[in-house]
Image (cartoon, coloured by chain):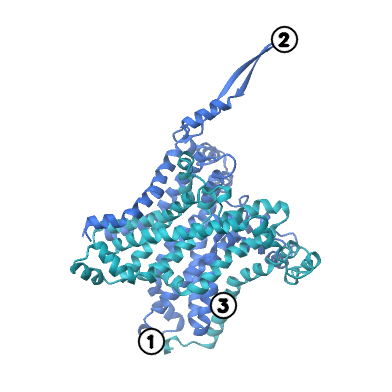
Chain colours: A blue, B cyan
Amino acid sequence: MKHASFFWFVLPSSLMMLLFIAFPIVSVVTQSLYQAHEQVIIEVENCGPFGCTTETAVDTQATAALREAEPLGQWAGLNIYKDRNHLAVDEVTAAWVNADGLPDFGRALMNLPFYKAMAFTLTYTAVVTPLTIILGFIIAIAVNAVARSLRGPTIFFSLLPMIVTPLVGALILFWMVDARGILGTALQWLADDPSLSVKASTPLMWIMLMVYGVWSSAPFAFIVYYAGLQTVNTDTLEAAMIDGASRWQRIRYVVIPHLVPLTTFIALIQLMDNFRVFEPIVSFSAQAHATSLSYAIFNDLGGETRLLSSAAATSVLTIIGVAILLSPVLVRTWREFGSPR
Amino acid sequence: MSVATRRSPAANTLAYGFIIIWLIMAAFPFLWTLWGSFKVEGDFFSKADWANSIFGTLTVVETGSSFTGDGYYGAWVQEEFWRAALNTTIVCVCVVTISLTCGTLGGYALSRSTYRYAFWFLICALMFRAMPPITLVSGYLLPFFEWNLWGHLSTTIIVLVAINQPFTLWMLHAFFKNIPKDLDESAMVDGCTRFQAFRHVIIPVMWPGVITTGLFSFLLAYNDFAVTSMLLSKDNQTMVPKLASFLGTTQTKGNVMFAVSAVVSVTAPLFVMIIFFQRQIVSGLTAGAVKG
């Protein structure tokens, strides 16, 4: 394809991505280096019959005018990154000096909002991604083993948790594990503890969020693996069988190697999606127990005072996180395709 | 069935048992919520006895019959959920149309270009795909406030189209790769320009791929919460942010059932969609992977 026609064909999409994806990234970085103007304070002298007093007051008009004139706020450099809500440099140093032992240091870190969000996001990503892949694989193997007439309905119902709006899917689960819901009651009965409540316990909340994560994304892994299983070479399977391979050995040495490229694909997509975990935390109203990076940004942006700079700084840190997460993939593609042939 | 896939009875039972457990896990929460949405709150969240939510003991006491549409009435009429449903329809139709138009052009070009930059273009798109939408939203807010773009449906539509673009490009690129090159090239030998070849030769055969991609664009727009909740003003809210706002307000009014019926209302169109388009969804999910 000629350069010129390529250019005109991709123009609309690249313009959109440039304006609404690349430009906002620049805008986020800029915003994170500024902070909101402080309120303009004026001194007012009140003179009465008993002498004069000076009072300080907020000059709302001047404040509004200043904010109007420079909506970005004032230059802050890296201050926002260093404050307590983000990297918390001072607090971490203090905790490092004062802590006796690593666990104590870890506990101190968990009191800082950014590290708390980071810890949950990373744990969630690290736990949910492999579990999704394993569960999806098992379902695919099982579906492949049952009668053909059962496969259609299984795929139909399996698609539900994946396709349903994440906020809605998480709400449905949340209502069921509510202390007054059916699963909540079942849990209380199982644990023999009538006061057990998922809402009130941090570990249970983490587990519940991860259960939701696996529940909602296992179908994706299942469908991809199932499609992959249809293309396994039956000749190879038969040959392995004639050579005396057991069922397990056939899965281990024929099927799994065939599915490895698919696993890379699923893992890549899942890593990207799990790192942005957000809606379940809103649905579960879990912010007291677990926050993620995306939730932290959402929290800053919402509400009465929109903390744009704080949200921007967290966003930049999140983007750096995504870049680190994707770097192995990028390095690999660079090695494979990037070098001039 | 070939010999290689015959199984022992034990393995078979295991497979069936596992499938049944998974089906219950996947489908039961939805059936439960659908059933419960026709009850009153005291039954849906039953403190006394979990079986109440099946038989609707309190629902009978409060409304006289074991099913009630109060939750739906409250959500759709009282809280004007229909307005949100209308907005969702507008947003979804526009997002799907615009993103498919831009996406087919771009995806076609990417599948036909043999130059290196086409490959790096796709890698760039992949990186954009990895950006959590909420990080981008924090970049939009200030400019949108400044230029008075905030709160309108049209702004949200364009933003959603842009966020969907990387995914749409990847998927359509994969589909166009499957359409033989000879088709449009022979048209060009016969004197068509590149665009004419696209218009008269490729467009007639591209629909299966476009429909599948359209389904996923629809899902991305329909399911979005981060963008719509942040960029839409209160009167322009679509269904998902509206539903989230029920959670805040209705808990105090004791009308959790509004949210429950709204949840069922949001799920219903998706359910219908799977019934009609199961094959396309499955082929779309695997398109990127198998052809990789």
Q: Secondary structure at mark 3?
A: helix
The answer to which of A297 and B215 lies nearer the viewer is B215
Quick check: marks 1 and 3 in contact, CB under 8 Å?
no
Q: Is residue A288 left or right of residue A6?
A: right
Mark 2 or 1 closer to N-term? 2
Residue in the picture at 58% in, 71% down: B26
Q: Position of residue B66 (x, y in %)?
A: 75, 70
Q: How far is mark 1 from mark 3, CA to CA?
A: 26 Å
> Marks 2 and 3: which is nearer the front?
2
Q: Chain of mark 3?
A: B
Q: Position of residue A115 (x, y in %)?
A: 53, 46
Which quadrant of the figure contains the C terminus of chain B? bottom left
Q: How far is mark 2 from mark 3, CA to CA?
A: 88 Å
Q: Chain of mark 2?
A: A
The answer to which of B155 and A53 lies nearer the viewer is B155
> Marks 2 and 1: which is nearer the front?
2
Tag 1: Cα neighbours inside 10 Å, few (<14), some, or many (≥20)?
some
Q: Which residue is mark 3?
A: B18
> Marks 1 and 3: which is nearer the front?
3
Q: Is residue A334 left or right of residue A258?
A: left
Q: Is residue A190 left or right of residue A287?
A: right
Q: Which residue is mark 2?
A: A49
Q: Secondary structure at mark 1?
A: helix
Q: Position of residue B253 (x, y in %)?
A: 72, 52
The answer to which of B173 and A195 lies nearer the viewer is B173
| Kind of residue at disc 1 | Glu
